């Protein structure tokens, strides 16, 4: 193993992450034969196969799995070393890897502008994905920080509450119940319903509420995107339950409206989170501090300005800190 180079480890980690030689080659701007050759040399140095190929699919062997974990630890320590050196020179420099839940795309990207202007040496990669994928990324230790709404019970994490992220019932603006108050939850069972995909945290929260009240939903359609669901509602396919933040920038001429249904809004919050064993890099700590101070203020102001009806609701205190995030 001592003969192996850092380059070989980088190539191997990219193949393992993408489960593909071709996609790793694309990411690293290498040819596929070069990628295969690097993995072959590494396999020889390890003395055991790192991948099994079944048909066209690649599977990591046990040795491969161990090596991926080792690679990620090495890269993380090297990144931290580079950041510490930059910090000694009085600079904040390095890469920040963020993974955020789909609804956080309505506020996190807006906060990045001022942050990047202040710290031009920090590069950011931002992954936007659903609840299940966030949890998988967390277990694989792929990112520095996560923004999510439902905290996992089975993972030991540190979390800090940011702002409210309530779920509301969204319908077309001309829906017959649009002007009704305190609509019975039971009535929602009669409406054609558009649901987020399996693995979505929104879907889980909706299912839990309706199961608790034993109301079956008439699901017409599963869609894997909040924006696609909004279009489907506007197109008259049904109603749905989404984060109120998905209505940011809809404006007063929006084709969508929020129905006033009992038990709504479902109260939820966004949290900044990371696994409790993880040592945050200097850059990640800098971003977390920014997020919990100026970032949070910006997000609150933005929500009050751009989301219909949001100023009527408190945006929630966000001072808590701790493992349970409460
Ligand atoms: P989801 O989560 O994209 O997994 O539905 C959204 C949220 O929790 O705000």
Image: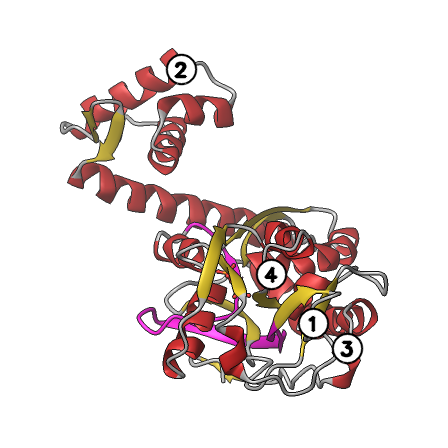
Instruction: For label 3, count other residues whose C-alpha is less than 10 Å away and answer few (under 14), some (14-19) or many (20+).
Output: few
Where is mark 3, residue-wise? 309
The residue stretch that appears in magenta = 142-168
Q: Position of residue 246 (x, y in %)?
A: 67, 62
Question: Where, by quadrant of the figure, is residue 31 drawn?
Answer: top left
Q: Which one is in front in this view, the residue at disc 1 or the one at disc 3?
A: 1
Using the numbered discs, state the Cα–Cα distance from disc 3 to disc 2 in whole angstroms. Answer: 53 Å
Q: Nearer the viewer, residue 125 or 100?
A: 100
Callout 4: CB less than 8 Å from ligand 1:
yes
* Mark 2 or mark 1, earlier in chain: 2
* Mark 3 or mark 4, earlier in chain: 4
Give the answer, above or below, for where 45 lies relative to 250.
above
Q: Residue furthest left?
A: 48
* Mark 3 or mark 2, earlier in chain: 2
* Mark 4 or mark 2, earlier in chain: 2
Q: Relative to residue 145, is residue 64 drawn left or right?
A: left
Q: Which one is in front in this view, the residue at disc 4 or the one at disc 1?
A: 1
Q: Position of residue 139 (x, y in %)?
A: 35, 57
Where is mark 1, residue-wise? 176
Residue 147 belongs to magenta span: yes
Where is mark 4, residue-wise? 103
* Mark 1 or mark 3, earlier in chain: 1
């Amino acid at each position: 193993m001592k003969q192996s180079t850092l380059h070989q480890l980088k190539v191997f980690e990219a193949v393992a992450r993408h489960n593909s030689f071709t996609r790793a080659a694309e990411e690293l701007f290498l040819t596929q034969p070069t990628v295969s050759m690097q993995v072959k040399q590494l396999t020889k140095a390890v003395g055991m196969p790192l991948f099994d190929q079944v048909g066209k699919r690649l599977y990591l062997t046990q040795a491969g799995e161990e090596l991926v974990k080792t690679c990620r630890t090495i890269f993380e320590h090297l990144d931290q070393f580079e950041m510490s050196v930059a910090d000694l020179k009085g600079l904040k420099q390095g890469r920040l890897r963020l993974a955020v839940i789909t609804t956080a795309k309505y506020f996190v990207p807006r906060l990045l502008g001022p942050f990047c202007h202040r710290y031009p040496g920090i590069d950011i990669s931002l992954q936007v994905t659903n609840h299940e994928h966030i949890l998988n990324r967390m277990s694989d230790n792929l990112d520095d920080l996560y923004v999510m709404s439902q905290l996992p019970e089975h993972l030991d994490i540190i979390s800090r509450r940011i702002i409210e992220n309530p779920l509301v019932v969204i319908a077309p603006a001309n829906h017959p119940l649009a002007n009704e108050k305190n609509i019975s939850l039971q009535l929602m069972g009669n409406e054609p319903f558009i649901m987020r995909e399996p693995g979505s945290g929104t879907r889980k929260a909706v299912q839990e509420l309706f199961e608790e009240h034993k109301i079956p939903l008439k699901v017409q359609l599963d869609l894997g995107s909040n924006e696609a669901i909004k279009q489907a509602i506007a197109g008259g396919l049904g109603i749905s339950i989404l984060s109120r933040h998905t209505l940011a920038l809809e404006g007063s001429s929006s084709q969508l409206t929020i129905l006033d249904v009992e038990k709504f809004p479902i109260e939820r919050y966004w949290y900044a989170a990371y696994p409790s064993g993880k040592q945050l890099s200097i850059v990640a700590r800098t971003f977390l501090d920014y997020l919990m101070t100026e970032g949070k203020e910006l997000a609150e102001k933005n929500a009050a300005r751009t989301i219909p009806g949001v100023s009527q609701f408190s945006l929630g205190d966000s001072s808590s800190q701790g493992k349970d995030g409460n």
